[in-house]
Image (cartoon, rainbow, N blue to C red):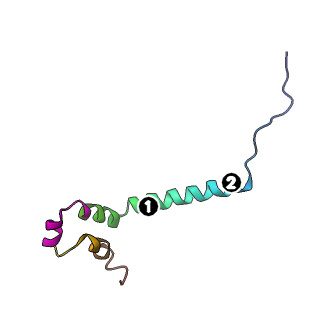
Amino acid sequence: MAHITHDHAPRRGILETIMSGLNGVLESLASIAENSHRMREIERLQALSDDELAARGLTRQGIAHHVFRDVYYV
């Protein structure tokens, strides 16, 4: 019968630990952005046809500027 006297669990290197933490932060930021009301507005406007955008006085290139107009001066 064999007996185990110690554990050989692999250790995580410092780079792997840092990258894991950074990945978690980036996933959190992506989740925040995806759930933003501004991102939902951009997606809604992008789903419109060019004619529908033109009726609203918008172009595809101007969607982000329109949605963020109160936050950024461009």
Calculate the distance from the C-alpha at mark 2 to the C-alpha at mark 1: 23 Å
Q: In the rendered structure, which segment of residues is drawn in magenta?
A: 46-55
Is 1 one of the magenta-colored residues? no
Q: Quarter of the image containing the C terminus?
A: bottom left
Q: Assign the magenta stretch its main secondary structure.
A: helix
Q: Quarter of the image containing the N terminus?
A: top right
Report whether 23 appears left or right of 39.
right
Report whether 32 appears left or right of 10.
left
Residue 53, picture quadrant: bottom left
Check disc 1 and report the residue beneath it.
Answer: 32
Q: Which type of secondary structure does the marked residue at label 1 adopt? A: helix
Check disc 2 and report the residue beneath it.
Answer: 17
| Residue for point 36% across, 79% down | 71
Q: Which mark is residue 10?
A: none
Q: Amino acid at mark 2?
A: Thr
Q: Amino acid at mark 1?
A: Ile
Residue 48 percent across, percent down from the top left: 20, 62
Residue 37 percent across, percent down from the top left: 33, 64
| Residue for point 68% across, 53% down | 16
Q: Residue furthest bottom?
A: 73
Is 49 one of the magenta-colored residues? yes
Q: Residue furthest top?
A: 1
| Residue for point 38% across, 59% down | 35
Q: Earlier in the sequence, mark 2 or mark 1?
A: 2
Label 1 neighbour load within 10 Å: few <14, some 14-19, many 20+ = few
Above/below status of 15 relative to 70: above
Q: Which type of secondary structure does the marked residue at label 2 adopt? A: helix
Report whether 6 appears left or right of 40.
right
